[in-house]
Image: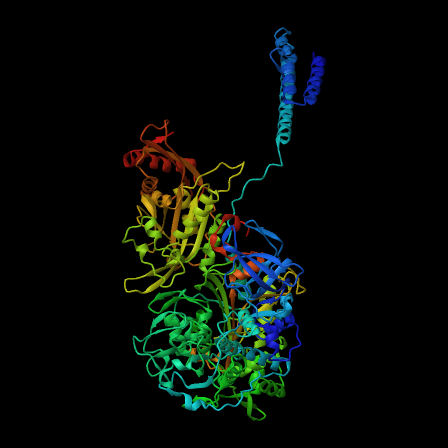
Amino acid sequence: MEKELEKLAGEIAAAVNAAKTREELEAARVKYLGKKGALTAFFDKLGSLPKEEKPKAGALLNTLRKKADALLAEKAEGLESCSESNALDATLPGRNFSTGRYHPLTIISNEAKEIFKSLNFQIIEGPEIESDYYNFEALNFPPHHPARDMQNSFHLGNGMLLRTHTSPVQVRTMEKQKPPLRMITIGKCYRSDASDQTHTPMFHQIEGLMVDENINFGDLKGILKVFFSRLFEREVNIRFNPSYFPFTEPSVEVSFSCHVCGGSGCSVCKKTGWIEIGGAGMVDPNVFKSIGYDSERWTGFAFGWGIERLAMIKYGINDIRLFPENDLRFLGQFE
Amino acid sequence: MKLTYNWLKEFVDLDLAPEALSAKFISLGIEVESLTRLGDISGVVVGLIEKIEAHPNADKLVYCTVDAGKEKKLNIVCGAKNMKAGDKVPVAVDGAELPGGFKIKHTKLRGLLSEGMLCSSKELGISEEADGLLILPSDAPIGKDITEYLNLKDWLFSLEILPNRPDYLGIIGVARMLSASLKIPLKTPEIEIKKTDGKAASEVKVTIADKELCPRYTARIIKGVKPGASPLLMQLRLKFAGVRPINNIVDVTNYVLLELGHPLHAFDKKLISGNHIIVRRAEKGEKMTTLDGVTRELGADMLVIADEQKAVALAGIMGGNNSEINSSTTEVLLESAFFDAVNIRKTSKTINLSTEASFRFERGMDHEGMIRALDRAAYLLQKYCGGEVCDGIIDIYPEKIKARKITTRFDRVRKLLGTDIPDGEMLGISERLGFKMLAKDKTGFTVEVPSFRVELDREIDMIEEIAQVYGYEQIKERTPLISLTSCIPQTSFEDEVKRALVGRGLYEAVNWSFMAKSWFDKGGFPAGSPLREYPEILNPLTDEWNVMRTTLLPGLLANTTHNVTRFGNRNLRLFEVGKVFLKDSAGKFSEHKNIGIIATGLISDPGWAESPVEADLYYIKGLVESVLASLRVPYELLEGYEGEAYDKDMAVGVRINGKTAGCFGELRKSLLKAFDIKQRVFYSKLEIPSMEAARKGTIKFAQLPKFPAIKRDISFIVRRNITSAAISAYIESLEIKLIEKMSVTAVYEGDNVGKELKSITFAIVFRSPDKTLTDKEVDDLNNSIIAGAAEKLGAVIRK
């Protein structure tokens, strides 16, 4: 009987091993361990054995039974993981991560803030409802001056208006702080101009101011070069063209060499090699005078331009009216 | 301002091509809005209309027989009315090409073949408005190419002139700057007035009654003028500049205005009663009809040109129709005056009338150059209108305007520009720009400012002049030395708020600060709603934007309508951080930075592996609470919040520092319906200043626990009106110190617990700071909770 059992053990191991599916494994189990299985048959025979052989045979049978169970279980586990990997469709999309989005104007504002923070500029905020004094007079726009026509304002009564630019924050900051100072401010501005592809009656501006001893026109060019080169991650050159703003003199229109073609001319810069961005200049002595700074000792520069314009240039957005629309198909693109 | 290349070349010897000139303008601070090639047409010739017949099939069309110098006469159908047989007009023959690539072919028009087109000046690209066919002089040679005949091959510059350069509002001013910058000679316009017998001074008397508002008034008298059409070239140039030709006399004044920049006015002298011009303020309520046919009531602060009986012109703005040049005019009083800029601007604003003249006067005119303008116009009246110019100028100039002087320090120029411009270069530039050198030494120089540069009077003005001509491209860039400041805030609270919300899967919106007053009615907000305390915009662009927003809701709702209703994107989670604006009862404005959050549809992007979850009150509550917690803002919630736009009992208030500073809940159905939204929408408002004021300092680290925790779940079966807060309050009332944390892990209502009952499962975590708890200790504590639950909550504990 010992020999027979040894042989059976070998058969069982081979059958289990050979099983390729759960069905085959189950068939093997039934064949040997089922009610009418080969191993079960030995258990049935146990009763007819002589009394003295019973304990030994019983022990042998039990060991074999345990072995067989273990073999089956191991094989079943193997088949299970195997069948699972067969069922996996790795081409199905992964699970969704519902990620949020910053508005593109926030993305650009944050990038600009980071650059100016690294240059040790403070970030200041100011009111959107302003007095005529801060929006115009202190910035050297005398009452009844045609320069006021450059910025049509919305009036709220009581001599208050919606600021037409962020420049009032310059005045408010200089009133509170003594030079030297470096600041930027970013915020909403309002002009009563009809909407078109490049204008909306509400828009965002970034404004900067630096006042110190010995600040000159060349410093303005230098700071702007640093800013635009960092923002567009490419060394750019700065071009100044004469312009006019009552609160700066000399006043300039600022362009930087095209970040796409590097200045050789492409469709982005309309073949000019330059991208016009905004205004800048040396702070007009009249502005210092209204603040009470000594314009012989302190000199400074200021600059400002539209955040929308920056975002349009950087991302190739062709219509400014997309910004306040908040279409998910638009917002979703700025991850 | 618009001018043509050839016209400009009459004032300066230019050898720059139009494109190069355009670049030069930009480098001089004159923005070129457009540069257009003119006469970009072919196949248009001079034609003679021989016969005009009615069109048999159309009342508004006629059928013309035209001699265009071809072998055969052309039959052309035409819709214009201003021509007669015998007129010469431009004819676009078969194959002609007009501006914009418009091609002319033989076409049947209402059944008749038209072998070409008779052209207006608009069709030839000369003017913006179509005012009938362009009638050519009778001596125009038939068949001649129109671009040759009219000298049309030219370039049109449209320039944007900044308010500080009124001198650029005449071609001469632009020419002067080009001359200085390019070092090329300036040409002065031709003026040759013939001597006549008449004496201006004996023809008319001029009195200035208000010398503040009119510091100088000059005039000339021209007799024997013959009104008619002005020369074609003059008409064309006026049209190019956007000025409508009227008659030869008026055209001359406009032509000189464009050339020399100084506004002029021609009166029919015979209509000036008493031959006396009086420059005075209008009387309050005085009426006059201006040339545009509008009768205007004047104010006492407005200046008029009057005769002894009536006002004949609104000074510096527009003439009166009672003294207008007309077909029987024979004598002209030509005015060239200098008016106070601020007064002209105020009047122009008050009566809402801006003209070529007022636009220039309000920017400041040249009180010397006005004489040359007067002479040039008189000369052209003599040349083109058959006029005889009376001898002498009437020049009333009560107080000579003093020339301005500026002293400039060489070192200051170099210091401010950061560029080593030599002394000599500065002197040379100043002289080329027309400044008269009064004195110079080693340290600087003093100049007299020419009268045409009205805006210059300070050293900084000279520095800018020098820098512009020297060239901004020569300014050396340098990075300034920046001293480091020790303490600059690195993040703003607003940035943190945005980060917290974006991190929770929301998209950021930026909406208009304006809204419509009518929004509150449409949305069903009661008359006394605090949301209606809006600042009103007195000059709104449209009624959609006539007040400032008092809440972020209108923008976010509009975004919902746009995305959900219009574009079918029903899952939307948006926030905005922005200001709202209020006006208090005293009329004082204030602005407040708020957060607005809107959620509707699924709370995460749907996919095959995720089970879809719809936004509900617990989504917005969880969002608000987790944002407040992450920003370290302590808060309390207050059920039964009313206000904003919620249904009753559908909103919760957020209290910060004892003050209501926010809310969240489900938006009113009636509001959503008004804005075309058919699904549930949840909204929250939070006030940033209150949050920022209440926030706790930096993150404080807590020691990690040394001993393990033991967790027990208890399911309380209670009546449905027992809240989870009541159960946690009960547990807290037992003051079991070893409870570290408890949370709700399941809520069940249904058959298994019976009607009007629900099961709420609390997971309670027990931990001691001093030792490892035994199961027995925890079971005892757990049992003490269970023990009182029946009495205090009427609860049954589910086993």
Residue B121 sits above or below residue A64 on the image: below
Residue B578 sits above or below residue A2 on the image: below
State which quadrant residue B10 falls in. bottom right
Whether residue B98 is visible: no
Q: From the top left corner, tell me how far across and down residue B529 is, in percent.
A: 29, 53
* Residue B470 shown left or right of residue A2 in the figure: left
Picture mark count: 0
State which quadrant residue A237 falls in. bottom right
Residue pictured at 47% horizontal, 70% vertical:
A150
Q: From the top left corner, tell me how far across and down residue A324 is, in percent.
A: 47, 55
* Residue A156 shown left or right of residue B89 in the figure: left
Whether residue A263 is visible: yes
Nearer the observer, B583 or A269:
A269
Residue A79 sits above or below residue B127 on the image: above
Look at the image and tell me in which quarter the N terminus of chain A lies.
top right
* Residue B671 shown left or right of residue A212 in the figure: left
Colour convention of the picture: rainbow
Residue B99 sits above or below residue B5 on the image: above
Nearer the observer, A134 or B517:
B517
Q: From the top left corner, tell me how far across and down residue B322 is, in percent.
A: 38, 76
Nearer the observer, B710 or B517:
B517
* Residue A297 shown left or right of residue B104 in the figure: left
Nearer the observer, A177 or A6:
A177
Q: From the top left corner, tell me how far across and down residue B525 is, in percent.
A: 31, 50
